Amino acid sequence: MQVLSVASEIYPLIKTGGLADVAGALPLALKPHGAATKTLLPGYPAVMSKIKDGVVRLSFADLFGSRADVLEVRHEGLDLLVLDAPVHFDRPGGPYVDSSGKDYPDNWRRFAALSLAAAEIAAGNMEGWRPDLVHLHDWQTGLVPAYMRYSGAPEPPSLLTIHNIAFQGRFEADVFPYLGLPPQAFDLDGIEYFGGIGFLKAGLQMSSAINTVSPSYAEEILTPEYGMGLEGLLQFRSADLTGIVNGIDAALWNPETDPKLKRNYAAATLKHRGENRKAVLDRFGLAEDGGPLFCVISRLTWQKGMDLLAEVLDELVALGARLAVLGSGDRELEEAFHAAAVRHPGRIGIVTGYDEPLSHLMQAGSDAILIPSRFEPCGLTQLYGLRYGCVPVVARTGGLNDTVIDANPAALAARTATGVSFGPVTADSLLRALRRTVRLHNDPKAWTQMQKQGMKSDVSWEGSAGLYADLYSSILSKKGA
Ligand code: ADP
């Protein structure tokens, strides 16, 4: 089976969140299932500087105002199709925002360009290769099914994966004439969305099938609270909607071999985590005194419940715990954590910014990772935590709900517990969970058992890749039927 995957970011070339991890890991995990994937992605500077010897496979004299080439290249086991379109992608700043953190005003054009290039490839216009199926990721690729449909060319079936429904790619109606779509596309059945244009909406409307990154989130987005305006359309398409939990790159995230750790360890040598713990304490300026060391590795945002955590920091310290925070995001939240670090020297430490190596060390040295998200499509940090014996303390929502087994008395007695989960997602409920976690940590036998049970959890891509392979097959057979 030949698959064209289209993504706006892919690890290890460019990453702002979990989407990149999935786009990078799934093609490798699907290989043993007979799916060969080529991934189309934008040629940002970070991508162009890392690829060498790309072969031009398709050219556009004018792709929404830019000359553009599709360069085929292999990189770390991935087959990539890089869309080199300098006007759209060769600029400083991130994939979606400029150096000052503002959305690029022409994001609609940039990702329309990516989507149109994908549709051309899907239609077989790249010589010598034609995909059997197109796998799309998030709003940036939402127009692909629209371009495929309205081109009139034979259309391969498509799967759209929602990584986070909060990001919908909504734009004013006045950009419509520039998208190169026929007038009838601006319709309830097309790309029109609340009077404007919705990239994700278009994809949900027109793709052959839809999935999201956990079964719980697939249920949640059918409700107004989580569907964020798209619940009606999703209910309409619910027969084509499924949920598959993400895996992690088990080679990259392996405490036995991870070169980013001070000391490697396994479930049988958990005491070696102590050296990593010491390194984390040093890095964050924290003192050792036997209480649990909590960590946060996260965007500092409302979605991630970081305001709730900020509310209970004094109580957390009073419980005898310490906290190391790695993250960046809302200025107010960053300031709240900085202020708490000043109030509680040696107890709370914060490193602002994005630091991949430090995130590995923190998973290997902290006792627990706090993830009080208000919604969480899948979440990856709890999966890393499970694998590293860093006990996840999570809100009972989305993928967090599907991957962590709460340490309730029955689960503890059955030795199946892998973490602590709580709900509703409020500061009070989080504080109760922190108290419960500290009590568990005071019982080293129960705690070690929970760490070991977590380390046994299957968080690799193997199981989920099998589910994706089955989903691909069912989409193809439906299309053929
Ligand atoms: P989301 O994609 O919503 O941000 P996920 O949990 O799905 O959340 O994925 C976040 C990814 O980004 C994880 O791989 C996590 O380790 C990483 N990450 C988040 N913040 C940081 C940071 N400040 N430094 C390093 N890695 C981070």
Image: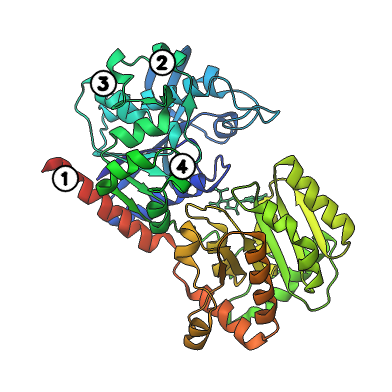
Q: Nearer the viewer, mark 2 or mark 3?
A: 2
Classify mark 1: residues with Cα within 10 Å, few (<14), some (14-19) or many (20+): few
Q: Amino acid at mark 3?
A: Tyr
Q: Nearer the viewer, mark 4 or mark 3?
A: 4
> What is the quadrant of the N terminus in the image?
top left
In front of the other: 443 or 372: 372
Q: Amino acid at mark 1?
A: Lys
Residue 292 in the figure: left or right of residue 285 = left
Distance between the alpha carbons at the discs numbered 4 and 3: 25 Å
Whether residue 331 is visible here, answered yes or no, is: yes
| Snapshot quadrant of residue 312 | bottom right
Distance between the alpha carbons at the discs numbered 2 and 3: 14 Å
2 or 1: tag closer to the N-terminus: 2
Residue at x 67% of width, y 85% of height: 444
Q: Amino acid at mark 2?
A: Phe
Q: Amino acid at mark 4?
A: Ile
User: Mark 2 sits on what residue?
Assistant: 176
Residue 403 in the figure: left or right of residue 184 = right
Distance between the alpha carbons at the discs numbered 1 and 4: 26 Å
Q: Nearer the viewer, mark 2 or mark 1?
A: 2
User: Mark 4 sits on what residue?
Assistant: 165
User: Mark 1 sits on what residue?
Assistant: 478
Q: Is residue 39 above or below residue 338?
A: above
Distance between the alpha carbons at the discs numbered 2 and 1: 32 Å
